[in-house]
Amino acid sequence: MGDLVKVTKGMPMFPSDMILVHSDSDDGYCYVETKSLDGESNLKLRRAKTELNTAYGTDRALQTFHGQIECDAPNN
């Protein structure tokens, strides 16, 4: 079970173990700075799945979000 976290432009820091569900851009893209994780100051491009970005574009819609995430185990 997890939490939904709303991240807005200009937030100084937020958890790194998150999945992008929605972006305000129509194509679902956003840029993330990972300097505190890997020391790199360039922005990383991330994209929400098209189905999620389209279906969950409002706070109200996100309140009804249910899903399951399957991923690989952590690695070195």
Image (spheres, rainbow, N blue to C red):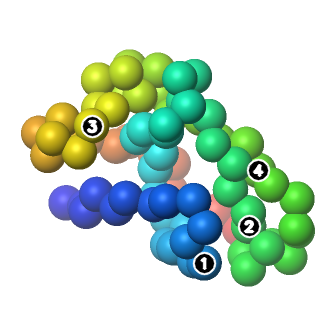
Sequence order check, earlier mark of 1 and 2: 1
Depth check, front residue: 30 or 10: 10
Q: Amino acid at mark 1?
A: Pro
For label 3, the crowd category at 10 Å Cα-Cα, with few meaning under 14, some 14 to 19 and many 20 or more, is few
Depth check, front residue: 37 or 31: 31
Are the two marked residues, 1 and 4, in contact with CB atoms closer than 8 angstroms?
no
Label 2: which residue? 34
Please determine whether, in this image, residue 64 is positioned above or below residue 5: above
Gap between marks 1 and 3 measured at Cα: 23 Å
Label 4: which residue? 44
Are the two marked residues, 2 and 3, in contact with CB atoms closer than 8 angstroms?
no
Q: Answer with the quarter of the image where residue 30 lies.
A: top right
Residue drawn 36% across and 28% down?
52
Q: Residue furthest left?
A: 64
The residue tagged with tag 1: helix, strand or loop? loop
Sequence order check, earlier mark of 4 and 3: 4
Are the two marked residues, 1 and 2, in contact with CB atoms closer than 8 angstroms?
no
Camera-side mark, 1 or 4? 1
Q: Is residue 2 left or right of residue 49?
A: left
State which quarter of the image contains the N terminus. bottom left
Q: Amino acid at mark 2?
A: Thr
Gap between marks 2 and 3 measured at Cα: 26 Å
Sequence order check, earlier mark of 1 and 3: 1
Q: Answer with the quarter of the image where residue 2 lies.
A: bottom left
The residue tagged with tag 2: helix, strand or loop? loop
Sequence order check, earlier mark of 1 and 4: 1
Residue drawn 33% across and 32% down?
57
Gap between marks 4 and 3 measured at Cα: 24 Å
Label 1: which residue? 12
Residue drawn 49% across and 59% down?
8
Residue 18 visible in the current orientation: yes
